[in-house]
Image: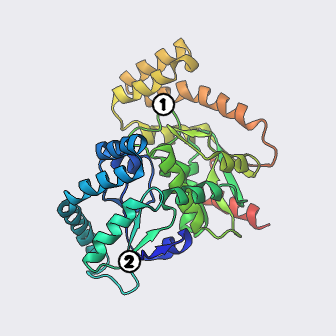
């Protein structure tokens, strides 16, 4: 049988419903964004076939795989039909003539071929990815090596850097928001109110997809970050470029910073705030930790901020001292719009 296969570039350009047929564990670890998981084998079945392959060889493992598929064809079709209906409702109720069912597995082998064969029996136009997810991951990792025109926006905690980036995005500038993609704000308090973080592999996938959409000739704004954002890590090659890129350092009055932090964090449960303080208690020291905990109990939010800001500010100053290409913007009480106008002046002159 001839399977319609595409290289990664054509596969990504092709419109249609994207299906990952790997096991749930493989999918959770990392997948192509916007794909849905219709596993040919569940985690246990995949483990059984893998053991068969090691002990008895490929032919026996393939036979075992086909036995499993034969017993679940109805379930696979039902699951596909469910996702298809959801897809159709989002695309106006029908497949366009140029749209395909896009299928990939780990390496473009038996699992994607099996789903391809099954869906073709129902006369759905299908295409599978040559080299599968492994091919995609190679593309992801390679994209971080390409030279980017990065502008790093720095500033101490509470400077409203993320909101400034969001405003720049609304003005059609290219923004890569590491914290939004990581579902984390980057500090010990950064996970409060956020959904679960992606795996680090999936985090890399998400970053690469955003980078691929950008115009390579234009600047990309990013926020100054440490390498780790919660449990996620900025890809090494990309972070290395950030360290060597032009940096715009925003200085704002402490009053503005404290007000911003109070507005952001005082709405969370006291116990959650205390846990966040205790995670950095060794670095805060016993006295500041005690003051912060007592201030949370008393809802003295300004004192909570002051107790932890000194620690974060010293860490930030230590990280900043080795930077070379830094433009300081001493904005004190200036508004976000005034700061943005200054940033635009810097990159256009």
Residue 92, given in percent of the width and then of the height, sits at: 29, 81
Residue bearing mark 1:
302
Residue 153, relative to residue 8: is it above or below?
above
Residue 282, relative to residue 218: is it above or below?
above
Nearer to us of marks 1 and 2 is 2
Mark identifier at residue 183:
none
Cα–Cα span, label 1 and label 2: 56 Å
Residue 10, given in percent of the width and then of the height, sits at: 53, 75
Residue nearest the viewer, comparing 73 with 141 = 73
Total numbered labels: 2
Residue 187, given in percent of the width and then of the height, sits at: 52, 35
Can residue 330 be seen in this snapshot? no
Residue nearest the viewer, comparing 140 with 252 = 140
Question: Farthest residue in the bottom direction?
Answer: 97
Rate crowding at label 1 as few (under 14), some (14 to 19) or many (20 or more) other CA atoms within 10 Å. Answer: some
> Going from the N terminus, do you reach mark 1 or mark 2 first?
2
Question: Farthest residue in the top direction?
Answer: 286
Q: Quadrant of residue 85?
A: bottom left
Residue 265, given in percent of the width and then of the height, sits at: 42, 37
Callout 2 secondary element: strand
Residue bearing mark 2:
100
Residue 122, relative to residue 273: is it above or below?
below
Callout 1 secondary element: helix
Rate crowding at label 2 as few (under 14), some (14 to 19) or many (20 or more) other CA atoms within 10 Å. Answer: some
Which quadrant of the rendered structure holds the N terminus?
bottom left
């Amino acid at each position: 049988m001839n399977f319609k296969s595409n290289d990664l570039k054509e596969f990504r350009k092709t419109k249609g419903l994207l299906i990952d047929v790997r096991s749930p564990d493989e999918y959770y670890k990392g997948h192509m964004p916007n794909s849905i998981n219709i596993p040919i084998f569940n985690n246990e079945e995949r483990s059984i076939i893998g053991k068969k392959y090691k002990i008895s060889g490929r032919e026996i493992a393939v036979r075992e795989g086909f036995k499993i598929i034969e017993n679940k064809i109805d379930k696979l079709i039902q699951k596909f039909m469910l996702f298809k209906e959801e897809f159709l409702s989002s695309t106006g109720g029908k497949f366009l003539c140029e749209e395909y069912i896009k299928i990939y597995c780990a390496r473009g082998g038996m699992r994607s071929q099996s789903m391809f064969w099954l869906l073709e029996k129902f006369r759905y136009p299908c295409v599978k990815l040559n080299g599968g997810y492994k091919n995609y991951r190679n593309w992801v990792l390679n994209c971080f090596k390409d030279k980017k025109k990065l502008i790093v926006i720095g500033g101490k905690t509470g400077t409203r850097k993320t909101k400034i980036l969001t405003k720049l995005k609304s003005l059609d500038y290219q923004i890569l928001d590491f914290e939004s993609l990581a579902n984390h704000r980057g500090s010990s308090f950064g996970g409060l109110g956020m959904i679960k973080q992606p795996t680090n592999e999936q985090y890399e996938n998400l970053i690469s997809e955003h980078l691929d959409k950008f115009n390579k000739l234009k600047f990309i704004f990013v926020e100054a970050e440490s390498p780790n954002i919660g449990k996620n890590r900025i890809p090494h090659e990309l972070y290395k470029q950030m360290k060597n890129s032009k940096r715009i350092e925003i200085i704002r009055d402490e009053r503005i910073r404290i007000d911003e932090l109070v507005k952001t964090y005082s709405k969370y449960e006291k116990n959650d705030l205390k846990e966040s303080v205790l995670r950095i208690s060794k670095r805060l020291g016993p006295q500041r930790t005690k003051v912060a905990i007592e201030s949370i109990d008393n809802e003295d939010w300004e004192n909570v901020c002051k107790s932890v800001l000194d620690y974060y500010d010293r860490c930030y100053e230590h990280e900043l001292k080795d930077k070379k290409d830094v433009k300081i913007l001493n904005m004190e009480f200036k508004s976000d719009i005034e700061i943005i106008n200054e940033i635009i002046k810097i990159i256009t002159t």
